Image (cartoon, rainbow, N blue to C red):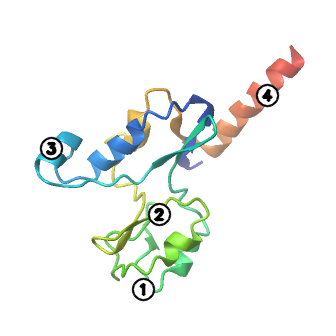
Amino acid sequence: MKNEILMRYERCLGCRSCELACAAAHSQAGSIIGAILAGEKPANRVFVSQVGDTKVPLNCRHCEDAPCIDACITGAMHREPSGAVTNEGGTSRCTGCWMCVMVCPYGVIRSDLIQRRAVKCDLACLDDGGIPACVRSCPTGALVLAPVEEISSARRKQFLIPQIG
């Protein structure tokens, strides 16, 4: 089974550690302070949104049937051999048409108006163990890297135990 970045929204405090870790991992300096001192404006590729009292960390799902790839008119948005959907390092250059932004069902592709390109999770922040920066930085374990079946099985058990007991 393939590991995916999944969320346990009930654990999210809205601290935005995942956003900061993501931005730092994608900066040339490798840290937020270093990036700021070097004049960089690092951009996060994970977003913490809030609806009422519920905070939810959102990131690219790297969809199997990715609408952003289909909508990309230049072919810049593509799937890497690792399975990551990205427009980084492609043969075609992103022109900033924002078609991918419009079709993303999760709203996790951001438009960089200065560089005129789409910015999204590219999984280029993995450590030696294959753990993304956002998952590593989450103090409450709201973001996890696990097979979908493992998380859904845990959810079923969590639901059933109070019902049986």
Residue 102 rendering spot, x and y as whole percentages: 55, 72
* Residue that appears at 40% across and 54% down: 45
* Residue that appears at 44% across and 50% down: 46
Q: Secondary structure at mark 1?
A: loop
- Dot 1 corresponds to which residue? 74
The answer to whether residue 130 shows anywhere in this view is no
Q: Sequence order check: which comes first, mark 2 or mark 3? A: 3
Front residue (pair 163, 79): 163
Q: Sequence order check: which comes first, mark 2 or mark 4? A: 2
- Dot 4 corresponds to which residue? 159
Tell me if label 2 and label 4 are in contact, CB under 8 Å.
Answer: no
Distance, label 4 to label 1, CA atoms, is 46 Å
- Dot 3 corresponds to which residue? 34
Q: Is residue 66 left or right of residue 84?
A: right
Q: Secondary structure at mark 2?
A: loop
* Residue that appears at 50% across and 73% down: 100
Q: Sequence order check: which comes first, mark 1 or mark 3? A: 3
Can you tell which mark lies on residue 109? Answer: 2
Q: Secondary structure at mark 3?
A: helix
Residue 39 rendering spot, x and y as whole percentages: 13, 54
Task: Report the mark closest to the observer, 1 or 2.
Answer: 2
Amino acid at pointer 4: Phe
Q: Sequence order check: which comes first, mark 3 or mark 4? A: 3
